[in-house]
Amino acid sequence: MQNDGNEVGTSVYHRINDQLETGVQLAWTAGTNQTRFALASKYQLDSQTAIGAKVNNICQVGLSFQQLLRPGFKLILSALFEARNLNAGGHKVGLGLELES
């Protein structure tokens, strides 16, 4: 992303314990005084399964489910909801397969 020095941002990541991770991201754009933030969390249910959630300042809510199918193959399901207008649609659903060697 190119911002020509007009954007300032920071993020903080914290691993609370072996199962729970959290993060906060903040950004500010000069000239527009636009401020953005997001909060996220990931919870490890067991050694092969994790769930995640994220919310940002424009009321988008993201949810994810990750399942290790076998060593090197991970299935990822995700969804992004527009919480301000749940009935209008425009929501997104994703499916991913992560391969590692």
Image (cartoon, rainbow, N blue to C red):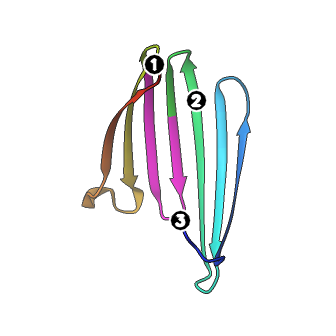
Disc on res. 72: 1
Q: Secondary structure at mark 1?
A: loop
Residue 62: in magenta span: yes
First in residue order: circle 3 vs circle 2: 3
Q: Position of residue 74 (x, y in %)?
A: 42, 24
Q: Which residues are magenta?
A: 52-67
Mark 1 or 2, nearer chain start: 2
* Residue kind at label 1, given as amino acid type: Gly
Q: Is residue 10 left or right of residue 51?
A: right
Q: Position of residue 8 (x, y in %)?
A: 68, 70
Towards the viewer: 11 or 89: 11
Eyeballing the image, is 89 above or below 45? Answer: below
Answer whether labels 3 and 2 touch (C-beta < 8 Å): no
Q: CA distance from mark 3 to mark 1?
A: 30 Å
Give the main secondary structure of the magenta stretch: strand
Residue 1 — which label? 3
